[in-house]
Structure formats: C-alpha cells, structure tokens
Amino acid sequence: MNRENLQEWIRRNFVPVIAGTAIALILFLGIRYIVNLLNRPAPAPAKPAHEKAEDPDAIHYLVVHHSVSGWGSGAAVVEWHTGPPPHRNWDLPGYHAVIGNGYPTKEAWKKRAYDPSEDGKVDRIVSESLRVNGVRFGNKNALQVCLIGDLDRRDPTEKQMAALINLLTHWCIKYGLDPRTAILGHGEMQERIGLEGYSKTCPGKRVDMDAVRAAVLTKVIQRLLPRGMQR
Ligand SMILES: [Zn+2]
C-alpha cells in the first residue's frame, strides 16, 4: 500500500467513524445536560414561621416543688437561696414562684398564727425569662413553682392547690403547653432525666400530681372555650 492509498483508506474508514463518535458524544452529553437540568430539585421554599428553628430556651416544663418547711414565703425563699452562708448563696432563687400556706414567717409558724391572706398567696420572685436552679440537669426549659410546706407529712392547703392550679393554667396557656405532659413534680422530672437517683418525693407524697394535671387540663379547656361556653 503506497502513501496515497493509505491516506485514502484512512479518509474512507476512520474519518466517518471519528466524526460519528464525536457527534454521538456531543448528543449524549447534550441530552444528559438537559435531563440533569430537568431533574434538578426545585429550591426549597422558605419555611413558614411556625416551622422556624425552635428557640433553645423555650419553656417545655412546669415543675412543682415543696419547701420541706412548716413556714415560708417568696421573701423567705429569696433569703434561703441567695443569702450568704449558712444560706445557699446562689445568684438567683431556685423557683420562679412561691405559694404560701398562711405561715409566712418562723414566728407565725411557732405561734400557729395562721394568716388567711398569706394562704395561697403567689409570690413571683424571679422573671420567667430567666432559668433557675430548681432541678439538677432540668432547668433549661422549665419554670419552677414551690408550695410552702412539708408535704410529705402534711397536706397542702386548699387555697394553695387552687393557686397552684391557676398559675399552672396561666402558664400552660401563655406558653402553649399540654398540662398532661408539661407539668411534672420535681421527683418525676428527675426520674425522666435519669441522671440522679429517683429518691426525691418532691413536691411531697401528699400532692397528687395526676390530679393536678387533670385539674389544669380541665381549666385550660374551659379558658380556651368561647366566652359564652365558659362556666
Ligand atoms: Zn423540689
């Protein structure tokens, strides 16, 4: 085969194959490009406001305590928790609210000088925007309320329970909480967290937390009904 014949052979046999391959490749890549373009996911729509990332400091729990003392008040708790030793010397008291039992001071308790205006009185001692040291490992998303009394040994007063149920109802509505899951006794909260022993009976064996949750649920439903249907 001489040189001219070889060139002629290449022109006839190779050029069409290479040209055909190039055209096929261009077509293939072009189609792939179009398919990819069509399959590209649509950009995600902006999330509606209620699906925005949850506030890490949001309130999820309402924790109930007792003071394990015969007497007390908001002022007494502030002293017990933030006073210098032998008090606890904390920066803030451990509860947002304290509910009196009619004996605000040691003297009143010693003399059994019951003051009805102090029974069921709610003292707000810390802003709800702050978190306080009520439950170890469980303060970040909780509000804390303390009933004055040693409620392992004595019943809470009727006025205390009425005030507690009112306050918890107010908080459930304000923070959009379900009373059945948001309200916990200190011991229940501790058990749920599971990082400490489950020894705490707080808020006391004489406080029926299931009854508290049920009473708050009834009250929340009542308050959310249209005015004409409220009892
Ligand atoms: Zn407690």
Image (cartoon, rainbow, N blue to C red):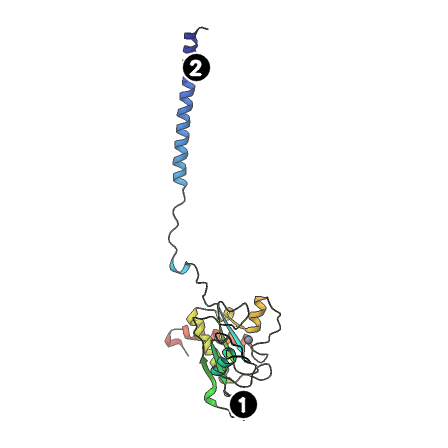
Mark 2: which secondary structure? helix
Height in image: 217 above or below 15?
A: below
| Residue at the image position 40 percent from the left and 21 percent from the top | 19
Q: Residue 106: give x, y in percent of width and height.
A: 53, 88
Q: Residue 33: give x, y in percent of width and height.
A: 39, 35
| Residue at the image position 40 percent from the left and 60 percent from the top | 50
For the residue pair 218 and 6, the one nearer the viewer reads as 6
For the residue pair 136 and 54, the one nearer the viewer reads as 136
**Which amino acid does the dot numbered 1 rest on?**
Trp
Q: Is mark 2 within 8 Å of ligand 1?
A: no
| Residue at the image position 43 percent from the left and 16 percent from the top | 14
Count the marks.
2
Q: Residue 162: give x, y in percent of width and height.
A: 48, 81
Quarter in which the C terminus is drawn: bottom left
Height in image: 108 above or below 202?
A: below
* Mark 1, other Cα within 10 Å: few <14 / some 14–19 / many ≥20: some
For the residue pair 227 and 206, the one nearer the viewer reads as 206
Mark 1: which secondary structure? helix
Question: Which residue is the site of mark 1?
Answer: 109
Nearer mark to the viewer, of 1 and 2: 1
Q: Residue 108: give x, y in percent of width and height.
A: 51, 91
**Which amino acid does the dot numbered 2 rest on?**
Asn
For the residue pair 220 and 159, the one nearer the viewer reads as 159
Question: Which residue is the site of mark 2?
Answer: 13
* Mark 2, other Cα within 10 Å: few <14 / some 14–19 / many ≥20: few
Q: Which of marks 2 and 1 precedes in the sequence?
A: 2
| Residue at the image position 39 percent from the left and 25 percent from the top | 23
Quadrant of the rendered image holding ligand 1: bottom right
- Mark number for residue 172? none
Q: Is mark 1 within 8 Å of ligand 1?
A: no
